[in-house]
Image: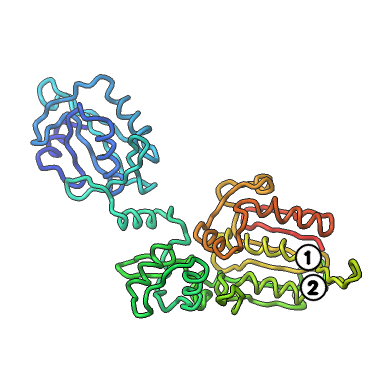
């Protein structure tokens, strides 16, 4: 940095892009200022400049190494700043300019004593980001959980109120707001991540619509299951049955916990029963119907597809396909978080859509978190016909194949 440019920078006051600091500042305090710049539009800290703009100069030994270390250890994700010197900015006094551009991986956090704190720059002040400001940064960066994003145009009337009441009262055993208490309902749904605030308005989240929407496919066309039954062992246009299973994921129950209206899981099981033939046999003198596929295994595969699929992939549903020799449940998207098939078989825990997992667990669909494949599907198929489910991970889809 030239002396002339430095003098221009310090000729004015500190603002949203310029901060003056003595070089004896503690590392976590400098990290705070850099994080605030990263979370706005970038900025420059001038080390060796007093608050009044006078030049005191840099005296700290190996200050460039010191700055580099704090940018790795005190900022998450770590950064590499641009460092430049203004030599003899005042007689015998040097100034170090530490410049950071607007961060590509917002939001950035200052890490101190094991705690992450997010800062933003407002004028010449670096302050903690509010919850709403932090949420906006996560949304803008695409790092926000996809299911927590707002669904434009989906307010309270987008929900099936009966299912919402059934969930909070029967399933969770909670106390409900009065029907006329819109604010109370919005607060309750926001606290459970079924709604969020976008542009000052309470709006249903993607997870909220998937679970409890009156017509989820109106807002999210990729929310259903396409169920087909083929005559042979390969896909063909002349399917025996081709159905679109639509509606909310959660069922509507009665006070005695019976299902009054089916959710997507029950619809999928109904399709399986209607398009496979049970094998009737006598066991201990009693007639027993043995289905082509064990219901508990199909149920687990369907639930996994519903709660773990990548809903950001539009234009394609989960596929449930029945062939003459097998059934396949195909989920759009690759496995999340570098999970492998072998890890799934041993019970690795993962959740792309945590809210969906949590609420479906409340209903009893997800019983052994992370253990469904190893504890239910594999032993279920082995006991049924001596086979194991085939788990096929591909770049754009994940397939569970069950042999007849």
Depth check: give the residue in front, 37 or 290. Answer: 290
Q: Give the left or right position of residue 354, taking residue 392 as reference.
A: left
Label annotation for residue 181: none
The crowd level at tag 2 (other Cα within 10 Å; few <14, some 14-19, many 20+) is some
Q: Is residue 140 above or below residue 49?
A: below
**Residue hosting label 2:** 276
Q: Are marks 1 and 2 in contact (CB under 8 Å)?
A: yes
In the image, 156: left or right of 355? left
- Look at the image and name its color scheme: rainbow
Q: Is residue 207 or residue 88 the one in the foreground?
A: 207
Nearer to the camera, 343 or 239: 343
Which quadrant holds residue 299?
Answer: bottom right
Which image quarter: residue 197?
Answer: bottom left
Residue under label 1: 293
Query: Badge 1: how crowded within 10 Å, few (<14), some, or many (20+)?
Result: many
In which quadrant of the rendered image does the C terminus lie? bottom right
Mark-to-mark CA distance, 1 and 2:
8 Å
Q: How many marks?
A: 2
Residue located at (12% from left, 37% from top)? 10
Q: Secondary structure at mark 1?
A: loop
Which of disc 2 and disc 1 is earlier in sequence?
Answer: 2
Residue 274 horizontal/vertical position (percent):
75, 77
Q: Position of residue 59 (x, y in %)?
A: 19, 21
Name the spot of residue 249 as percent of width and height, x first: 56, 70
* Residue 172 horizontal/vertical position (percent): 49, 66
The quarter of the rendered structure image containing the N terminus is top left
In the figure, 89 relative to 401: above or below? above
Q: Quadrant of residue 298?
A: bottom right
| Residue plotted at (90% across, 66% down) | 284
């Amino acid at each position: 940095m030239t002396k002339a440019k430095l003098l221009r920078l310090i000729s004015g006051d500190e603002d949203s892009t310029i901060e003056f600091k003595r070089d004896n500042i503690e590392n976590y305090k400098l990290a705070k200022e850099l994080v605030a710049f990263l979370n706005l539009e970038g900025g420059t800290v001038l080390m060796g400049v007093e608050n009044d703009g006078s030049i005191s100069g840099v005296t700290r030994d190996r200050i460039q190494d010191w700055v580099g270390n704090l940018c790795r250890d005190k900022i998450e994700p770590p950064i590499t700043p641009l460092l430049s010197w203004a030599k003899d900015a005042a007689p015998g006094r040097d100034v170090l300019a530490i410049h950071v551009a607007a961060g590509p991986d917002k939001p950035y956090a200052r890490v101190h004593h094991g705690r992450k704190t997010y800062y933003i720059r407002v004028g010449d002040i670096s302050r903690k980001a509010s919850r709403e400001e932090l949420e906006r940064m996560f949304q803008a960066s695409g790092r926000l959980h996809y299911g927590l994003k707002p669904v434009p145009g989906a307010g309270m009337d987008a929900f099936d109120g009966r299912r919402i009441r059934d969930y909070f009262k029967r399933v969770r055993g909670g106390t409900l707001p009065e029907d006329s208490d819109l604010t109370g309902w919005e607060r309750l749904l926001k606290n459970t991540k079924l709604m969020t605030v976008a542009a000052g308005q309470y709006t249903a989240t993607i997870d909220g619509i998937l679970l409890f929407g009156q017509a989820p496919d109106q807002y999210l066309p990729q929310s259903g299951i396409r169920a087909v039954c083929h005559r042979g062992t390969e896909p063909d246009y002349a399917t025996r049955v081709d159905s679109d299973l639509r509606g909310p994921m959660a069922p509507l129950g009665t006070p005695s916990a019976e299902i009054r209206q089916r959710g997507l899981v029950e619809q999928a099981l109904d399709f399986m029963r209607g398009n496979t033939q049970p094998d009737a046999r006598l066991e201990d003198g009693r007639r027993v119907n043995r289905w082509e596929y064990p219901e508990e295994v199909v149920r687990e595969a369907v639930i996994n597809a519903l709660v773990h699929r990548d809903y950001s992939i539009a234009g394609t549903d989960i596929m449930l396909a029945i062939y003459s020799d097998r059934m396949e449940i195909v989920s759009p998207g690759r496995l999340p978080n570098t999970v492998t098939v072998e890890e799934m078989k041993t019970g690795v825990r993962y959740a792309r859509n945590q809210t969906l997992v949590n609420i479906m667990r409340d209903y009893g669909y997800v019983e052994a978190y992370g253990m469904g494949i190893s504890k239910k599907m594999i032993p279920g198929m082995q006991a049924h016909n001596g086979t194991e489910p085939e788990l096929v991970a591909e770049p754009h889809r994940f397939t569970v194949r069950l042999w007849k």
